[in-house]
Every structure is written in C-alpha cells, then in structure tokens.
C-alpha cells in the first residue's frame, strides 16, 4: 500500500474573519411558501429533506404565503409584535443598567425575539420549557411580570430567587419555565426526562428543550436524542442556530452534518428547519411539533435559523471574531420589522402606530425598572436575607444546616 503521508488535524474555518466582507452565500434560502406542510402523523423517513430546507411564510413583500400560513388572527399577530417589541426594549434597558453597574451581567436577545415569543403562544398551560439564557421571550409572551424579571437581574430584596441565581437565569414553575443552568446542554436531557415522566404518569403536558448551536457539541445533546427517540418522549427539541457560540462560528459544533436539524435523522426523529426571524413560520412549526408530541407521535427536532445581532453577553466583544457589519448582511432580516411590514401590508398597522407603540412600551418598561430599582440594585438598596440561602433546598431542614444558620446568626 502506498504511504498516505503525514496525518493532518482539521479545524473548520469560518468563511470570513474580522475586517473581511460578510458572506452568507452558503445559506440557501428557499422561496417563502415553497416548503410543504406534512401531515402530523407523517413517517419521518419520508420528510428527511426538510432537515436541509428552511420553512418560510413571510415573503419579501410582507405577504404570508404557502401551506404554513393562516394559523394566526390579526389580533394574535399584533400581540406577538408587541411581545417582541417589549423584549427588545427590556433588553436595551437592562443592557444599559449593566453598563451603569446596577447588575453584574446581562445577555440580549437582539434579532432572535421571534423564536421564543412565537413558540410560547403555541404551548398550553402546564407545558414545561427547559430554556437557555436567551429565551426570556417565553416569559414575556406568557405575561410574566417584568418587575419580577428585573428584581432577579438586580438580585435585590424582591428577587423571587433570593439571589441564588446569576442575573437573567429566571425560574417560574407557574409559567412553565424551568430553572436555567449556566452549564448549557444539561437542560436538554432534563427536558426529555421530564417528558418521559409526564407520559409515564399519563399526564397531558409536553416538554420543550432548548439549546444553542454551540452547545449541540455537548454530550447531553446526543444523550437526549437517544432517550427521546427510544421512548418516543413527548418533547420538542429546539436548536436555536444563531450562527455563533460565545466566540466560535457554528461550523465548529455542526461538524460535517450539513445542518443541525440533520443530527436528528440518525435517530429517526422528524427534523425541520425554520426561518427563525419569521414569527408566523416559527409559530406554525411549533404548533406542528407540539401536536405531534401531544398525540403520542414522539419528539421533533426543530432548528431555528436566525442571527445573534448583539454580543454573546455583556462580557463579550464580538468584534474580535466576526465582521462588524455582518448583522446588516444577514439575509433573513429583522423579525420585528418583518412582522410590522406584514401587518402594514394587511392594513391593520401603520408606521405611525408602530412609533406610538414603541413610545408606550418604553414608558411601561421604564416604569417597571423604577419599581424594581426601588427594591435595590447590585450595589445599592435592599438585598436578599442571608437566611434565604438556607431555605427552599430541603422539605425538612437537616440538623447540619440548622446549626450553620444559627452560627450565621440568622
């Protein structure tokens, strides 16, 4: 046999580096309305091609077209627009608060608002999300009070989690929002386990797992797919592909699979890709996948193709690893602008009303911020009691914790 020569270690390279010209020519975007909508009980083997396409509803003219359109009323769409606008305004105020030293850390959703806001409206009360730190829209769209969210960010005396979580790592059982783990991917296998328990107990509630593109390289992601496919767990496996992990492009985690949705094919899981900046498409695909889970048809893997416009977090400088103008070149546009244009096209919205809504939402967010800050911020005002660290862990406090609490004088 001929000598093959020296082995070479392969490291995927992004198409462009900082200072270069943004290039999304590798993102193939089908025409809006061109991807078919299969029956809910479809055999996953017959729709393998959907793991390589992108489901879209809104076209360039702002029209809703194709088989995935028509599921939402004008009132529901207007509500969805306000949810996304509220999340974006909330983000801007909290990012500013972090820069002012009122909290230690923050993570924005800029450009990704449609994913969580639209998905939430497809769920039913009692369903449980196992989110990452970039799905606050699940709470906003479910009516969770912004003041409580801000209290948690500030870790003040009114923080519902008593200062025991990092800022933005919310938790609310009532709103189907499982406690966030900063070590991403752990929530994926937890979601599958929760869904399996719901099925074992003959409940009617389903679970939704959330993960980013970078964290799909974690072993928990693959373990979750094994259990979900084997036991047909009633779970929707969401992958938010915003093109970038904290400092590495998506190709590092994706490897040679072509798309993240394609990862599900080897497990026999129906796998779809959807335009994550299209509120109508996200909602329609979420409804489809959620119905499959609720009808005991097993899991669905959904990849949301979107773009992280902002930094990974307030601790990150994206100019070190991507071109500054890259977000402007993103071909799927801005989710808020696209839904706004659709509603204007339908004659139920206008630029004037949009400007007015922006002002109203800003006023509401500022009022919530003032109320939250009256309870304290990171360096000023009230703080959770030291006693709180001993509470809420055990149903009955064990003797060693009682002794420690006494020693702490609380």
Image (cartoon, rainbow, N blue to C red):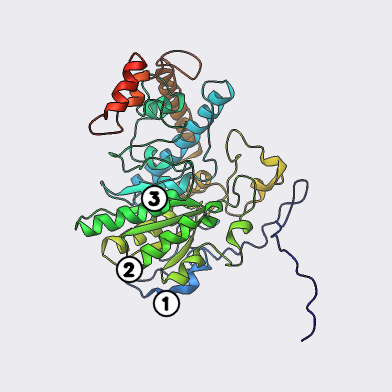
Residue 70 image-quadrant placement: bottom left
**Residue shown at 51% from the left, 16% from the top:** 379
**Residue shown at 35% from the left, 16% from the top:** 407
Q: Which mark is residue 118?
A: none
Q: Position of residue 213 (x, y in %)?
A: 54, 54
> Which element type, helix, strand or loop, lies under badge 2?
loop
Q: Position of residue 401 (x, y in %)?
A: 31, 26
Quadrant of the image for the N terminus?
bottom right
Mark 3 to mark 2: distance in Å? 17 Å
Side of 381 relative to 16 (left or right): left
From the image, tell me which residue sits under label 3: 119
Crowd rating for badge 3 (residues with CA inside 10 Å; few <14, some 14–19, many 20+): many
Crowd rating for badge 2 (residues with CA inside 10 Å; few <14, some 14–19, many 20+): some
Q: Which mark is residue 40?
A: 2
> Which element type, helix, strand or loop, lies under badge 1?
helix
Residue 57 visible at all: no
Crowd rating for badge 1 (residues with CA inside 10 Å; few <14, some 14–19, many 20+): few
Q: Looking at this view, is 380 or 43 the one in front? A: 380
From the image, tell me which residue sits under label 1: 45
């Amino acid at each position: 046999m001929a000598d093959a020569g020296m082995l070479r270690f392969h490291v995927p390279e992004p198409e462009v580096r900082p200072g270069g010209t943004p290039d999304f020519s590798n993102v193939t975007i089908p025409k809006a309305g061109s991807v078919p909508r299969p029956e809910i009980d479809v055999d996953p083997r017959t729709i393998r091609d959907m793991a390589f396409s992108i489901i879209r509803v809104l076209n360039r003219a702002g029209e809703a077209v194709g088989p995935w359109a028509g599921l939402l009323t004008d009132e529901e769409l207007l509500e969805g627009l306000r949810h996304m606008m509220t999340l974006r305004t909330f983000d801007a105020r909290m990012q500013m608060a972090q820069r002012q030293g009122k909290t230690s850390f923050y993570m924005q959703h800029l450009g990704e608002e449609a994913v969580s806001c639209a998905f939430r409206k497809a769920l039913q009360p009692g369903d449980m999300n196992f989110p990452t730190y970039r799905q606050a829209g699940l709470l906003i769209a479910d009516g969770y009070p912004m003041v409580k969210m801000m209290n948690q960010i500030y870790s003040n005396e009114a923080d519902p989690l008593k200062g025991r979580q990092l800022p933005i790592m919310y938790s609310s059982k009532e709103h189907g929002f499982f406690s966030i783990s900063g070590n991403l991917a752990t929530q994926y296998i937890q979601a599958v386990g929760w869904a399996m328990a719901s099925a074992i107990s003959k409940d009617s509630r389903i679970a939704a797992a959330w993960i980013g593109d970078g964290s799909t390289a974690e072993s928990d992601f693959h373990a979750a797919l094994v259990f979900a496919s084997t036991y047909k767990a009633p779970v929707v496996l969401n992958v938010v592909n915003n093109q970038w992990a904290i400092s590495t492009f998506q190709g590092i985690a994706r490897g040679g699979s072509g798309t993240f949705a394609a990862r599900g094919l080897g497990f026999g899981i129906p796998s779809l890709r959807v335009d994550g900046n299209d509120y109508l498409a996200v909602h329609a695909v979420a409804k489809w996948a959620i119905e499959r889970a609720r009808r005991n048809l097993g899991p669905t893997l959904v990849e949301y193709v979107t773009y992280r416009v902002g930094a990974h977090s307030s601790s990150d400088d994206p100019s070190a690893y991507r071109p500054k103008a890259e977000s402007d070149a993103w071909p799927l546009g801005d989710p808020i602008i696209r839904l706004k244009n659709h509603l204007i096209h339908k004659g139920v919205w206008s630029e004037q009303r949009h400007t007015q809504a922006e002002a109203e939402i800003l006023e509401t967010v500022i009022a919530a911020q003032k109320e939250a800050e009256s309870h304290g911020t990171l360096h000023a005002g009230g703080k959770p009691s030291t006693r709180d660290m001993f509470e809420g862990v055990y149903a009955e406090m064990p003797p060693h914790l009682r002794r420690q609490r006494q020693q702490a004088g609380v």
